[in-house]
Amino acid sequence: MDKKTPMFLKDDSFIYFVVIVLLIIVFLIEGMYIYVAFAGLILIGITAFTLRKQVLREKELKNYIIDYTKNIENLSVNSFYYSPFPICIIGLNGKMFWFNNKFKELLSGSSDAIENIGEFVEGFPLSSIEGNKDGTISNIEIPESGRNFNVMYYELEEGRFGEGNSYVCYWNENTAFITLRNKYNDERPITMLIQIDNYDEISEKIDLGEKSAMTAQVEKILNKYASEMNGFVLKYDNHKFLMMIENKFLETLEAKKFSMLDDVKTIKGTDFSYTLSIGTGAMAKNLTQLLEYSKGALDVALGRGGDQAVVKRINSVKFYGGKSKAVEKRTKVRARIISYALRQIIDQSSNVIIMGHRVGDMDSLGASIGLYSIARSRGKKSYIVLNNVNYALKNMHERMKKEESHYIESLITTEKALELAEQNTLIVVLDTHRKSYTEAPELLDKIDKVVLIDHHRRSEEYIENSLLDYIEPYASSTCELVTEILQYMEDHIKLTKFEADALMAGIVVDTNSFTFKTGVRTFEAASFLKRNGADNVDVRELFNESIDFMKKKTEIIERSEIVFDDVAVSYIDEYTEDSNVVAAQSADELLTIKDVKVSFVLVRNKDYINISGRSVGNVNVQVMMEYLGGGGHLNMAGAQINTLDMEEAKAKLFEAILRYKKESM
Ligand SMILES: [Mn+2]
């Protein structure tokens, strides 16, 4: 029946009703009025009865619902209190209004009368609740119990408990999952590729018996570590090992800074000691990726000069050790191979675009000029990207204009380089291997034929997939590397005097006039340049400074102070075009102070403070600068601090120095 039917017609009485109405009609037709009256009375009676029945039923139903609700309410209060889940009601400030029986059990040892959730779980993230109607806070750990909970909450109306909002929190135990997850992570495999990185060099200096005795000792040390960690080590080549351990042991290794690095150095029997490079892969998606991680990490460790461990995880690369000075160990074979390969690549390219790092120096420009001459000898048009001539390049640029104006025409801006770059263009990146440091990073997005030549220790950021990379942290300068490549080019390349001077200037600036990082091959490169017309006096002139510049340098040295016994620190608080160059040179000079082993000069730039760091001997200024997000190499490194407050930058620097001192003890 449809909705409009009156209530009282909704049951059986409807049939009686219809029958009686029909009877009345029949009686009326027959003229039997006395029956009509009688039937009418019955009709009224039935209607009244039905209506009454209806009303009663509705009333009953209503009472039933009221009763039921009352029961449920009682029940819910009880079930709240005796719920198998811990439940509590807290205010936004953490004030504890109420908690149930199970929650009380959680408190166990601690007092029942806690007033604030913070007394129970330190650092309960109240702020994440604020402003939400409901939600879940994951992984709340109950102190000392080892139990873990996800807390689901919902907001109660304002003023329900005290002032402001309050929240009902259900504590849903998560311990089993967390335990399992931790166990899973603890037991994940770690691969370590370990290599005696100076094996070949030392082999040349000792006899066979001594060599195998030393290698056996390295193996013994590694075996001791492996067995302590329930892992294993396998020798897979004369001087290469694979070690596998479970992830839970890696933390200890890292905390001890891979102490096998030092243990190996104690092996006696010769004047030389072995050093290790360790590439560690951790937390990879699968075993293939794990091996890739450790291979990559080993490359980085070797690329940074060896004697160190590198740990690669998905989003991080960490360095340990690397405190000893990189020894010259490259062979000339590599320079020859690189030279040959570079010639092939140049021959197959349509043109060559060369660039150094931004804020170029004599090493980056000198090397660019050297490379330009190589490309010219192969008959290829080449360009050097240089967006502006900064103070450090002024003198060289002047001579370029005077002596070889065709170079000036080949100096191009980033914009022009992007225009000239075509599919078959070769990009040569010099004196840096970090994309963000290059003069025109945009260019690397457009062109993927890239050759890298650099002498800085490899950092985390690295131009991947280059056709050829020649990164030699043992070399003094990029100019030294380019000079060697030049020597091995098949056809004799005739350097002009300017080119030879420019290459020599790069070596001079990066070795601080043949003082730092100067190896046998540095002198060999220098003598090649000398034979090709480089002149020391003319090179020296490239470094001549204005009186103004000299005064600034003197000021910086005067302002310097000695901190932590052997660190000289000074600063320039005003920004001028030449201040970074003044700073770098002053840092060099501060090192000549007696007993000073490290020097830093802080310089205000437009929107950051730049730090130039220098060190002598085995003090690793690169590690200190890396703490601040910078880099470089052992004795020469830098960093940028995102502040203009000199005191703040100094405080950060001091922190990094202290950290280094603490960690290298
Ligand atoms: Mn350099």
Image (cartoon, rainbow, N blue to C red):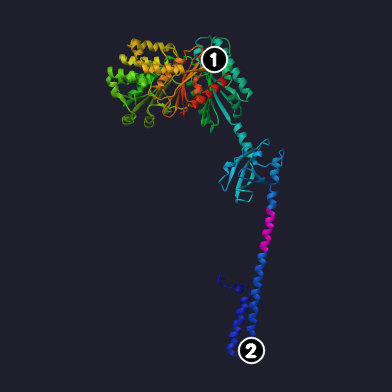
Q: Nearer the viewer, residue 647 or 498?
A: 647
Q: Which residues are magenta?
A: 64-76
Residue 55 placement (x, y as % from top left): 65, 71
In the rendered image, which residue does mark 1 sit on?
Answer: 274
Q: Quadrant of residue 470?
A: top left
Q: Quadrant of the N terminus?
A: bottom right
Q: Nearer the viewer, mark 1 or mark 2?
A: 2
**Quarter of the image where one finds residue 366:** top left
Q: Which comes before the other along the chain, label 1 or label 2?
A: 2
Instruction: Identify which residue, 192 or 252, lies in the foreground.
Output: 252
What secondary structure is found at the residue carrying circle 2?
helix
Q: Is residue 353 above or below residue 134?
A: above
347 is higher (above) or lower (below) than 32:
above
Per the model, the C-alpha gap separating discs 1 and 2 is 132 Å
- Residue ID at (57%, 72%): 5
Q: Quadrant of residue 278?
A: top right
Q: Is residue 108 left or right of residue 443?
A: right
The answer to whether the beta carbon of the residue marked 2 is less than 8 Å from any atom of ligand 1 is no
User: Badge 2: few (under 14), some or many (20 or more) residues near its Cα, within 10 Å?
Assistant: few
